[in-house]
Image: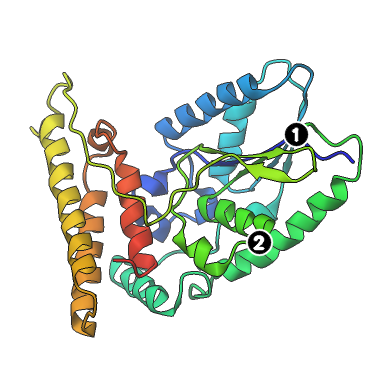
């Protein structure tokens, strides 16, 4: 059997739509590029991957055909030096289909609220996919891998460059997790390595401790910086404080939700709508300021969006 020593799932680097959600209204999702920071993350991932390889090991890379994943893959392989590798595009690893161009903020907020009521895994985005649909194509891809593992010539390390939701769905299918466990998982970080290591019995051990919604929120840490004030007169420190205040508002929303064990429907609506407002406010904050906060601003944004979508907030 040619099972690889490692299977590593890597989410793409930070993309333009991760920093500005409005891009999805006029740029096709599959054409969204990485930011400069995303390229840096992907390059660092390539260096990390090279360090993880044993002498003489070769690599097979399957990448989602979306631009941000292909750019991530290009940056990764640029750091591999003389390591032998092959790259193939695999459409089944693509992002969940959100229905072509996305709607305006009000309509998207309505969709997220509907999904929270219906269930994150089974709710199908209008003109798009549900996570269950993604699971079905992931199942087909897994079957392809199992057939390829029968070859003794299969690469020693398998890399899947994909998206956050696909990473969680892949793990759900592979390890036969329940829908409830899938919905308890937080998103993975940009260019985070999710490592599966083959054991003596040919089973794969997941080396990561996946983050869940039960994990405590980290406290934001405002760091000292010597960056000069930007063009509109607001210093980076001031923008960091703005992020901190918004972050604290999110925490208060969560505390309110935890205190009320039996919520009337109208209170639940207020909590969700206020959370979405905070989400929009955070989206308008300068991203560079957020990068100097102890917890990455995008983690905050992902948490707010995912919690709202999952009906946790």
Q: Residues within 10 Å of mark 2 (few under 14, many from 20)?
A: few
Instruction: Check if mark 2's residue and mark 1's residue have beta carbons within 8 Å.
Output: no
Q: Nearer the viewer, residue 203 or 254?
A: 203
Q: Secondary structure at mark 2?
A: loop
- Between 91 and 166, the residue placed more toward the observer is 166
Q: Is residue 211 visible?
A: yes
At a point 73% along the width and 15% down the height, the residue shown is 82
Real-space CA distance between mark 2 and mark 1, rounded to the nearest whole angstrom: 21 Å
Colour scheme shown: rainbow
Q: Name the residue at 28% across, 66% down.
A: 313
Classify residue 92 by image quadrant: bottom right
Residue 252 in the image: above or below residue 130: above
Q: Residue at x 54, y 28 (%)?
A: 45
Camera-side residue of 18 and 188: 188
Q: Residue 4: horizontal and vertical position, in percent?
A: 78, 37
Q: Is residue 93 above or below residue 81?
A: below
Q: Is residue 277 shown to the viewer in this render?
A: no
Q: Tell how many labels.
A: 2
Residue at the extreme front of the image, as rendered? 201
| Mark drawn on residue 189 | none
Apparent side of residue 40 relative to residue 158 in the rendered image (left or right):
left
The residue indicated by pointer 2 is 176
Q: Quadrant of the N terminus?
A: top right
**Mark nearer the N terminus (2 vs 1):** 1
Residue 138 position within the rendered picture, expressed as x and y whole percent measured from the top left: 68, 59
Question: How far across and how far down the image is residue 249, in percent?
Answer: 15, 55
Tell me if 229 is positioned left or right of 126 in this view. left
Location of residue 95 by image quarter? bottom right
The residue positioned 38% from the left and 60% from the top of the image is 306
Residue marked by disc 1:
5
């Amino acid at each position: 059997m040619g099972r690889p020593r490692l299977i590593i799932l890597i989410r793409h680097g930070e993309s333009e739509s991760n920093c500005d959600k409005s891009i999805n209204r006029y740029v096709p999702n599959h054409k969204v590029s990485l930011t400069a920071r995303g390229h840096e993350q992907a390059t660092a991932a390539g260096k990390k991957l090279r360090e993880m390889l044993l002498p003489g090991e070769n690599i097979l890379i399957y990448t989602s055909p979306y631009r941000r994943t292909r750019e991530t893959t290009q940056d990764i392989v640029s750091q591999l030096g003389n390591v032998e590798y092959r790259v193939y595009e695999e459409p089944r690893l693509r992002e969940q289909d959100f229905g072509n161009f996305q709607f305006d903020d009000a309509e998207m907020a309505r969709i997220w609220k509907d999904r929270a009521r219906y269930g994150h895994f089974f709710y199908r985005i209008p003109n798009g996919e549900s996570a269950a649909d993604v699971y079905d194509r992931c199942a087909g891809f897994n079957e392809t891998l199992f057939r390829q593992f029968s070859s003794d010539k299969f690469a020693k390390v398998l890399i899947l460059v994909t998206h956050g939701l696909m990473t969680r769905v892949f793990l759900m299918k592979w390890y036969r997790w329940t829908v409830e466990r899938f919905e308890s998982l937080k998103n993975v970080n940009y260019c985070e390595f999710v490592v599966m290591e083959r054991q003596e019995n040919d089973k794969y051990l997941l080396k990561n401790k996946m983050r869940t919604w039960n994990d405590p929120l980290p406290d934001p840490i405002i760091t000292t910086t010597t960056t000069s004030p930007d063009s509109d007169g607001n210093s980076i420190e001031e923008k960091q404080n703005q992020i901190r205040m918004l972050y604290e508002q999110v925490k208060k929303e969560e505390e309110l939700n935890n205190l009320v064990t039996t919520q009337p429907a109208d209170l639940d609506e207020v909590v969700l709508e206020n959370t979405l407002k905070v989400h929009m406010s955070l989206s308008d904050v300068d991203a560079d300021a957020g990068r100097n906060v102890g917890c990455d601003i995008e983690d905050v944004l992902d948490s707010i969006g995912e919690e709202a979508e999952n009906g946790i907030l």
